[in-house]
Amino acid sequence: MKFIGLLFLVVALNYVHAQGQDMSLTIYNEDLALVKEIRDIKLSQGLNQIEFTEVAAHIDPTSVHVKSIDAPNEVKVIEQNFEYDLVSKSKILKKYIDEEISVATKESGFFQGQLLSASDGTIVLKMNDGGIKILSEESIISVDFPKLPEGLITKPTLVWQINSSRDRDNNLELSYLTSNINWHAEYVAVVKDDDRSLEMNSWVTIDNRSGATYKNAKLKLVAGDVNLVREAVSPRAMGKSYMVNAQEMAAPQFEERSFFEYHLYELGRRTTVRDNQTKQIALFEGAKASAKKIYIFDESKYNEDIGVTLEFKNSKENGLGIPLPMGKVRVYKEDVKDKSLEFIGEDKIEHTPKDEKVRIYLGNAFDIKATRKVLNQKRLSDRAREETIEIELRNRKSEKVNILVVEHLWGDWTVKESTHTYKKKDAYTLEFDVPVDGEKEVTVQYTVLKKW
């Protein structure tokens, strides 16, 4: 269904639209962004109605703040509205119920009458002679309306009533929060042939579905858990459902610094973040760090499998030493035969400060297995029990490996005897670091006294 009469009507609407002189965009991990911009407008003495378009469709209107930069004491905002009842076929027809419209059809020609109903793919008209005409949507070429119904707009719009003491050119600073925009970090790590070092690159990925494009913006990203009060979502104009992929392959230009209890990453150049766009920008490249491959047997996590992890320290001495934002780490290793990189696993890291260790779970070992058995249980009293645990580790690889055996215990416990040395990591965790030669099996056995 086409709306020929509406096209000329929209062009004729008079919006007071001010182009932004300066744009700043701060994006948080919490599906939130702070938008700040300066717009140059002309004010007349007395009351002015100013309409700002090109704001986010998912704006939180209660967060909007506007002030005059040039004359804050002489320019006052006395009323503010956010209009988001956007033009659509169904809304225009609904507004014109009981009004006269003109309809052109493919085969039956032109009809003019009072609109009684517009639903279920049909339009019902009351003709001038009193007759009723039902037209299917498939047969309609166009519908003409005398004017745009009151209250409908083409773009989400902020409307202010501003009082000015005199005629002036004025810079207004506008800021607001919007949802449907997020960012996260992506990491790519390449493990060297000896599994003792890696090279890491990082990108930040920005997903903008807020309903606005932020042109030539000063960009900041905040990493951290910012508390938000979640409330019921009010109606908003819906953005498009598709995304445009884009990558900026420039050298990393983010400057990191502490900000309150969070970390802030500021891009050293301006960039445009378009609506319905996924943008990637390099955070850092070519960081080289020593790493350690750790085999872990933890029955509560892996059953009889042996988990394979890669651990490195996020320190300056180890080639890193910057706060790492939360994100997914994809790990690759070079096939020595044809020098191609092959994917070997991925994991998600949380926000990691400098000088902390990072452990990435990659998958389970193919050639190493384990079996855990409770060999003996003895009840000593109503509040005491003794257990003997046996863990068999089987290494079918040709080379020696070390396996970290993790046991989870409860109550007040004491290890009475053990075949291997152990470490009490905390009140609930017991660890054994067990070397197993190639093509060999090792059995760990320990007896624990539990009281509760």
Image (cartoon, rainbow, N blue to C red):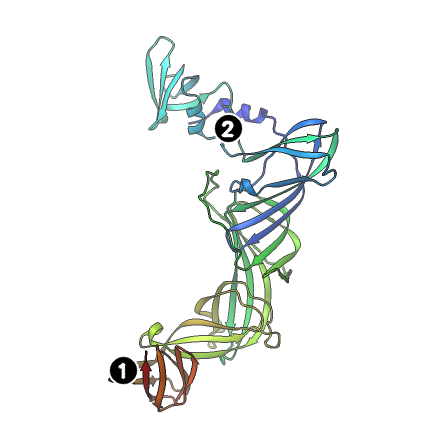
Residue 404 in sight here: no
How dense is the environment of label 2, judged by Cα within 10 Å: few (below 14), some, or many (20 and up)? some
Location of mark 1 (residue): 373
Horizontal arrangement in the rendering, residue 208 relative to residue 304 (left or right): right
In the image, 71 versus 102, the foreground residue is 71
Q: Which mark is residue 152?
A: 2
Q: Is residue 72 above or below residue 188?
A: above
Quadrant position of residue 71: top right
User: The N terminus appears in which quarter of the rendering?
Assistant: top left
The number of numbered badges drawn on the structure is 2
Marks 2,1: beta carbons within 8 A: no
Q: Position of residue 119 (x, y in %)?
A: 35, 27
Residue occupying the far front of the picture: 382
Of mark 2 and mark 1, the one earlier in the sequence is 2
Q: Position of residue 276 (x, y in %)?
A: 51, 46
Q: Position of residue 444 (x, y in %)?
A: 34, 87
Horizontal arrangement in the rendering, residue 296 relative to residue 199 (left or right): left
User: Given the image, on which type of amino acid does mark 1 rest?
Assistant: Lys
